[in-house]
Amino acid sequence: MSDPTALISSATSSPSTGAPAIGRNIDVASAQKTGQDFEAYFLSQSFENMFSGIDSDPMFGGGQSEGIYRSMMIQEYSKVAARTHATGIADEVTREILRMQEHPQH
């Protein structure tokens, strides 16, 4: 996985001189948040599929409240995994967003 600091410095500096990019509208913080949100969403969908085959415990489980709790638990698992860069998806998405901001398509 890539170093986020290197990603930021490469996105905010001129490729030829390494100097700060002047006149470019690069929003690194938003790109990082979007990358992390995308990774959390992706993991949430994966975790939903993983947990779909697990049945409720008949002694304590079942009902609508368990379904709600399970959904909330999966969302939190996904957020934690995304914050820890568990898969590297956020880094790749962030890198691509920054690349697209640096070289806008007309």
Image: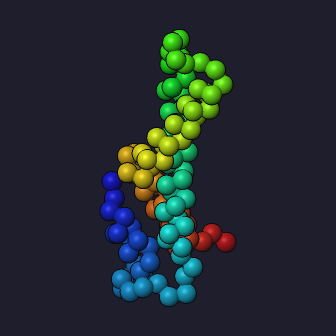
Left or right: 67 in relation to 19 = right
- Give 69 or 106, whichever is nearer the viewer: 69
Q: How many marks?
A: 0
Q: In this view, does 89 lie above or below 31?
A: above
- Give 8 or 74, whichever is nearer the viewer: 74
Look at 37% across and 46% down and name the residue there. 86
- Give 71 or 21, whichever is nearer the viewer: 71
Q: Position of residue 61 (x, y in %)?
A: 55, 18
Is residue 72 visible in this depiction of the protein?
Answer: yes
Q: Where is residue 4 in the image (x, y as percent from the top left)?
A: 37, 64
Point out the residue furthest to the top here: 58
Look at 55% across and 45% down and name the residue there. 41
Look at 54% across and 41% down and name the residue there. 75
- Give 99 or 43, whichever is nearer the viewer: 43
The N terminus, quarter of image: bottom left
The C terminus, quarter of image: bottom right
Q: Position of residue 84 (x, y in %)?
A: 37, 51
Look at 56% across and 38% down and name the residue there. 72
Q: Is residue 24 above or below residue 67?
A: below
Point out the residue furthest to the front here: 60
Q: Quadrant of residue 70?
A: top right
Q: In this view, does 24 lie above or below 96?
A: below
Q: Quadrant of residue 71?
A: top right
Q: Position of residue 64 (x, y in %)?
A: 66, 25
Q: How is the image coloured?
A: rainbow
Q: Is residue 1 above or below residue 65?
A: below
Is residue 96 visible in this depiction of the protein?
Answer: no
